[in-house]
């Protein structure tokens, strides 16, 4: 049991609801190849780039590292070149998700069903694109019915990326729930910092790409979402 009653569970998406990051990496590389760019991110390189939140921001960071002259000509993450590259990657990712290339994280279907049975409201707070989230929900309509989520705050709804707490503050406002009555579920340090910055308690569940990392000031560390199920009862 947690030491407070939970009215809402707020979930990150990538690495929390589903192990999506490997498909993201593959689709970044597919987009680079289509554009005739000589870039290909390895697992180790992508793991390092994940410390920067946001796909466009990751692309820009990479360009700054490998082609600083090109980077100097770009107008930040909103530059048309960066936006077009990221938009194509998003299309490829959605195709991959809908084709069944992404599995839900262990225990997620059971946790969501139990929360619903207990009357706990569900929400998503992510700075990934809405298209990515919708593709995941479309691929898992039984385990992740859209109507189960009271609100979904996505990258298009925010100005600032995690670790800024904006995405969680918006989610709480939409839910009409105070931070002391909600619990965030995250897999990364940036996500944990964002949730804590909004005043939330945070359960950290490491993912494939964050296992072994410093996950920041979480309140509880678990190995899987299944371990959270007996703790949300009230």
Image: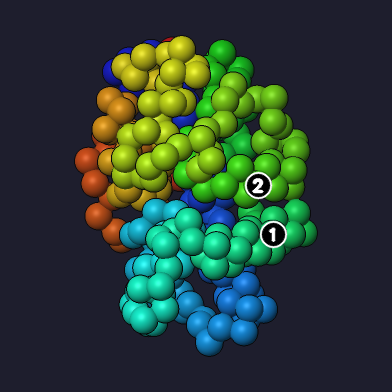
Crowding around mark 2 (Cα neighbors within 10 Å: few <14, some 14 to 19, many 20+) is some
Residue 55: x, y in percent? 49, 58
108 vs 227, left or right, is right
Q: Provide the residue designation for mark 1.
A: 91
Residue farthest along the left direction in this orientation: 217
Crowding around mark 1 (Cα neighbors within 10 Å: few <14, some 14 to 19, many 20+) is some
> What is the spatial separation of the Cα atoms under label 2 and label 1, in whole angstroms?
8 Å
Dot 2 and dot 1 residues touching (CB under 8 Å): yes
Q: State which quadrant residue 219 falls in.
A: top left
Residue 61: x, y in percent? 37, 68
Residue 86 in view (yes/no) = no
Q: Provide the residue designation for mark 2.
A: 131
Task: Tell me: residue 146, above or below residue 224.
Answer: above
Sequence-wise, the earlier of marks 2 and 1 is 1
Residue 59: x, y in percent? 46, 67
User: Which residue corresponds to the image point at 70% horizontal and 48% vertical from the top-left?
Assistant: 135
Q: Regarding mark 1 in the picture, which secondary structure is present there?
A: helix
Residue 91: x, y in percent? 69, 59
In the image shown, does 80 or 49 lie closer to the viewer? 80
88 vs 6, left or right, is right
> Which quarter shows the C terminus?
top left
């Amino acid at each position: 049991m947690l030491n407070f009653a939970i009215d809402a569970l707020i979930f990150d998406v990538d690495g929390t609801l589903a192990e999506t990051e490997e498909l993201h990496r593959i689709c970044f590389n597919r987009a680079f190849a289509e554009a005739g760019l000589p870039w290909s991110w390895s697992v180790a390189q992508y793991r390092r780039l994940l410390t920067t939140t946001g796909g466009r921001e990751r692309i820009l960071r990479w360009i700054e590292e490998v082609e600083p002259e090109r980077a100097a000509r770009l107008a930040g993450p909103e530059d048309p070149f960066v936006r077009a590259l990221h938009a194509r990657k998003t299309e490829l990712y959605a195709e991959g998700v809908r084709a069944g290339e992404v599995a839900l994280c262990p225990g997620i279907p059971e946790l969501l069903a139990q929360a619903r049975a207990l009357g706990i409201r569900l929400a998503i707070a992510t700075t990934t694109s809405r298209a990515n989230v919708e593709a995941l929900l479309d691929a898992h309509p039984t385990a992740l019915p859209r109507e189960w989520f009271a609100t979904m705050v996505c990258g298009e709804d925010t100005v600032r990326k995690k670790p800024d707490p904006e995405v969680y503050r918006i989610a709480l406002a939409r839910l009409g729930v105070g931070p002391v009555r909600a619990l965030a579920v995250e897999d990364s340090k940036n996500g944990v910092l964002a949730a804590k910055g909004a005043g939330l308690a945070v359960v950290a569940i490491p993912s494939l790409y964050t296992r072994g990392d410093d996950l920041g000031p979480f309140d509880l560390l678990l190995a899987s979402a299944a371990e959270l199920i007996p703790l949300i009862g009230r």
